[in-house]
Image (spheres, grey):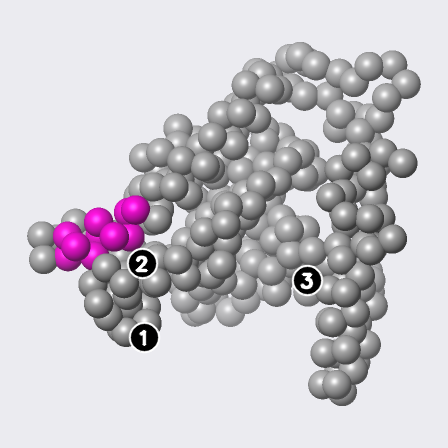
Amino acid sequence: IEARKYVPVPISEVSLDWWMIPKQEQTVFSMGEKVKQQGPGKVEVLIVAIHNSAVQKYREIVTKAALESTSFFELETFSTIRAVASQEIAPVMVVDMGAASTKLYIVELGVVRTSHVISRGSQEITIALSKSLDLSIEKAEQMKRTIGLSPLPEHKATADTVSLVLDYITAEARRVLLTYEKRYNTTISKVILTGGGVLLPGFFEVMSKNFEAEVVYANPFTKVETPAFLGNVLEKAGPEFAVSIGLALRKLQEFA
C-alpha cells in the first residue's frame, strides 16, 4: 500500500522487493551524538521496483545465449555499493558516471539512504565535442579520453566544451549532498568516484574542488585477492569493474 505512493507505475507492472532497515540504523548520528530518531511505531523500509518487462528481457538473453540460469537479478546500485563501500560509520556519497547517466547514492552504515539519477553521462560529453568542434564521434571520443579537461592553452576549446556538461553534473551532485546533510544534520565524509566516465582526465580534480569531503576513486579489487604485480593496473581500472565485482561478491556469498 505504501509502495504505491512512491512507484510511478501500476504495481502490477513491476517486480517489488523491500528490506526493513534495522532500528539501530534508523538513527542518524552527527559528531558522535544521536540527533534524530523515527517516531514511535514507525519503521523505515527500503523499496526497490523494476519493470517486469526489463526482468523478462534479461531472462530471454540468458536463455538465447545458452548461459547457465542466474540465481538472482540485482540492480547495479547494490552491486556497486557492495564493491566500493567500506565499513565507514559516517555517510558517504557514491558518484557512478556511466555513458548515458550519472547515478548518485548516499550510503550510511551500509544502507542506501537516498539515490538520484542525473540524465547526463560521459556520452553527452562525446556528443558535445562532436557538435561543437565538428568532429566524428570516434574522434570526439578519443579527444575526451586523452585530453578531457587539460589545462594546456592548445586544449582550451576541448576543455571548455567538456566543462559545460560536467558543470551541470557536479552542481547536481553538490545539491544532493548538501540537501542530505541539511536534512539529517550530518556530514558526508567521503565521495567515491566509480563508473568509466570518472576516468576522464581532470574529472578527479574538478570533483575535489567542488566538495569539502575527501574524494577518492573506487577500488573494488581491494575486496578480492589479486596478483601483487597487477596492483597499479587494477587500481586504475577499478572504477570500470565495480558492478561486475559486486555481483561476483554476492554470488560468492551463496557458497559461504
Q: Which residue is mark 2?
A: 128
In the rendered view, tell whether residue 232 sits above or below residue 66: above
Give the Cα distance between marks 3 and 2.
33 Å
Quadrant for the N terminus in the image? top right
Mark number, residue 247:
3
**Res. 214 image quadrant:** top left
- Under circle 1, the secondary element is helix
Residue at left offset 43%, top offset 69%? 229
- Under circle 2, the secondary element is helix
Q: Amino acid at mark 2?
A: Ala
Q: Which residues are magenta?
A: 155-164
Residue at left offset 69%, top offset 56%? 75
**Res. 128 image quadrant:** bottom left
Percent x, y of residue 116: 58, 41
Residue at left offset 39%, top offset 32%? 211
Residue at left offset 72%, top offset 78%? 61
Q: Of label 3 and label 1, which has the lower sequence position?
A: 1
In the rendered view, tell whether residue 96 sits above or below residue 134: above
Mark number, residue 138:
1
Give the Cα distance between marks 3 and 1.
31 Å
Percent x, y of residue 232: 40, 62
In the rendered view, tell whether residue 29 sits above or below residue 244: above
Q: Badge 2: how crowded within 10 Å, few (<14), some, or many (20+)?
A: many
